[in-house]
Image: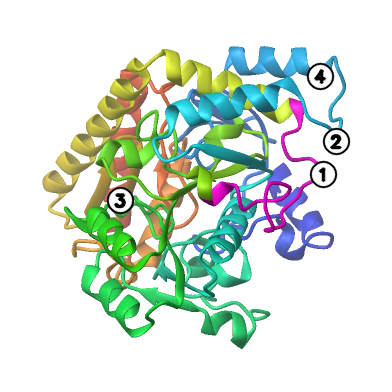
Amino acid sequence: MTTSEQLFEQAQQLIPGGVNSPVRAFRSVGGTPLFIKSAKGPYIYDEDGRQYIELINSWGPMILGHAFEPVERAVREAIQHSFSFGAPTRKEVEIAELIISMVPSVEMVRMVNSGTEATMSAIRVARGFTGREKMIKFEGCYHGHGDAFLIAAGSGAMTMGIPDSPGVTKATASNTLTAPYNDLAAVEALLDNNHNQVAAVILEPVVGNMGCVLPEPGFLQGVRDLCTKHGVVLIFDEVMTGFRLAKGGAQERFGVTPDMTTMGKIIGGGMPVGAYGGRREIMNMVAPAGPVYQAGTLSGNPIAMSAGLAVLHHLNDHPEVYTRLDEIGDKLRAGFQNSLVKLGMNCTINQISSMFTLFMTDRPVSNFSEAKSCDVAAFGRYFHAMLDRGIYLAPAQFESLFLSVALTDGLIEQVIQANEESLTVMMNYK
């Protein structure tokens, strides 16, 4: 029995399902999850000492690779002054100023402790600002585990087979309207049929939670125009895409500015950090400036702020990072596509810069129902074949990969070769 197997056996007696976040349990792909001991640059190492090329990067934050020295240095320096004060610090002001300078939609920002906190708070503020109760989300988009978001959710809920979680009340569900992603007509119909009742439309500008799904041309701008027309707050959930697709996130890359933006992952450099921000008149609704209450004892704590500042300063000062991420994603896509052609396989690859998904379906994937056409069992076989070859992927079909600049051209070639071998194994499965 491996060390990971022993730890998982023990963990299942102590932690629900043996894990502290459902996708880690490997339920979608089968087998026992790896317990990770350390990571550096493009590699992670499990408790049995095995090395893997890492293509998840802690689900996004490690855009510069694991244990990036400037981030480590910033955290070590901050720790000397104590871990948390529960009082304002200079670093909170500095990171707020930096975020506002980088993200087009953000005129004021509030720090929280997770992406889920950020999205929950943003919806509350939008409701307070508009005086309306309903919200529109998109099928397959996952915005954290807040009750209002677990309606036609993606990612973990999709993987575990419970897209509508028990514990979510009917009253909450009744105020959450859903539309297919990339279906502008459906959004327009919902807004028309719920006139002056919708407070917010929230969406991932590039979806990462049913796999990587890109907006079709004109979709984001169309949603922006509809929200403006109906007086609805448009929220871009950039917990995944923020600071990854560009310095200013997907809104910079696509040239569409929302009213509010939620952020996480990269913003904390691997620490548990989130944020939400937007137009000044909306953000001034937040207590103590306004009547919409939101608080957090550890929000803006100096250790997390130090890590986030180090990452954001590096990204802001080194725009070549984004050029390199585009190159890495494009090379990986081309290599995978060449292997599919060589093997005569029809799978779908969705990729934009450093976000990437190989879907086990021959259909294009642009929404939730198309993503569900994937052969999940085939993906499980593929996942384990890649793992056997030292490549650590997201353990679920319905997740995006997140690449880092720590990947060298040589490592990219190793991944491409492992992919071809793994696809061959999958094809020969009887």
Residue found at x 54% / y 61%: 129
Q: What amino acid type is highlighted by mark number 1?
A: Thr
Check residue 19 for magenta coloring.
Answer: no
Marks 2,1: beta carbons within 8 A: yes
User: Tag 2's secondary structure?
Assistant: loop
Neighbourhood count class around disc 3 (C-alpha, 10 Å): few under 14, some 14–19, many 20 upward = many
Q: What amino acid type is highlighted by mark number 4?
A: Ile
User: Tag 4's secondary structure?
Assistant: helix
The first of marks 3 and 4 along the sequence is 4
The first of marks 2 and 4 along the sequence is 4
User: Outermost residue toward the bottom?
Assistant: 170
The first of marks 1 and 4 along the sequence is 4
Q: Which mark is residue 79?
A: 4
The first of marks 3 and 2 along the sequence is 2
Check residue 298 for magenta coloring.
Answer: yes
> Where 81 falls versus 335 (above or below)?
above
**Residue at numbered disc 2:** 86
User: Tag 1's secondary structure?
Assistant: loop
Q: Position of residue 362 (x, y in %)?
A: 19, 63
Q: What amino acid type is highlighted by mark number 3?
A: Leu
303, 166: nearer the viewer:
303
Residue 67 in sight from this viewpoint: no
> Where 303 falls versus 7 (above or below)?
above
Marks 3,2: beta carbons within 8 A: no
Question: Which secondary structure is most common in the magenta stretch?
Answer: loop
Q: Considering the image in quadrants, where does the C terminus appear?
A: bottom left
Q: Which mark is residue 358?
A: 3
Residues in magenta, as a range: 282-302
The first of marks 3 and 1 along the sequence is 1
**Closer to the observer: label 1 or label 4?**
1
Task: Specify the quadrant of the image occupied by residue 145.
Answer: bottom right
Give the CA distance from mark 3 to mark 4.
41 Å
